Amino acid sequence: MIILGLTGSIGMGKSTATRMFRRYGVPVFDADAEVHKLQGPGGKALPAIEAAFPGTTGPAGLDRQKLGAIVFGNPQALRRLEKIIHPMVYQVRRHWLQTQARARRPLVVLDVPLLFEGKADRVCDATAVVSAPFHIQRRRVLARPGMTEEKFRQIVSKQMPDREKRLRADFIIPSGLGLAPANAAVERIIRCLHGRKARQWPPRQPGWKAGWKARRRVHCAP
């Protein structure tokens, strides 16, 4: 089973790309959606979040405004939150991969916003980044409710620069030129990965050194 890691900075159009993969029948694991489940009503992460940040949860789940006011601009608080959420997402992701492998899926996509930052690319056979020019990214993000220029700049500053992601990724999906070029890029990725030998799943025996150092860059004919 080939695992494609999909990433992209805020406002780059990653959600549109995942919908394209799904239309071609490729299963997608949405890390952000899983985080929302963990933090929603009855979510498994709520007790630990409440213990670490009292008063931020309730019957409706996480109060994002209250928690945001605590962790925004506070690296230590953000790390405490990540230590709660990330292991839980990892367990859900692993179970999802097992399920897809049992279903004999030839290709799956891991949609992870911080794919490179969190080193999740180490479990992938190939990676793709959704990218658009900065002025388009900025316009998209500032159009979101409650977004300000300051928030946008702070979010971008915490993410790996788009240029570096493009250099690291095996594939680039352009999202600033309309839907057709993006869809063509998705089609090309699926064609390129079809029939390739998977290297990351199922996991190797203990002692096998997984990760980006163990895999070679993917090259395909135009």
Image: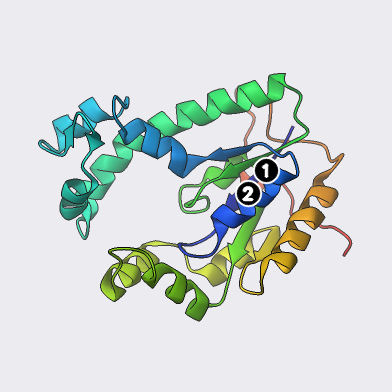
Position of 195 relative to 46 (above/below): below
Q: Quadrant of residue 63?
A: top left
- Circle 2: residue type: Arg
Which residue is at a point 47% across and 32% down the rendered structure image? 90
Q: Is residue 146 left or right of residue 12?
A: left
Residue 85 percent across, percent down from the top left: 34, 36
Residue 205 appears in the rendering: no
Residue at mark 2: 19
190, 219: nearer the viewer: 190
Which residue is at a point 38% across and 38% down the rendered structure image? 36
Question: How many neighbours does mark 1 have within 10 angstroms: few (below 14), some (14-19), or many (20 or more)?
Answer: few
Kindly state the secondary structure of the residue where label 1 is placed: helix
Residue 144 percent across, percent down from the top left: 37, 65
Question: How many neighbours does mark 2 have within 10 angstroms: few (below 14), some (14-19), or many (20 or more)?
Answer: some
Kindly state the secondary structure of the residue where label 2 is placed: helix
Does the residue at mark 2 contact the one at mark 1 (Cβ under 8 Å)? yes
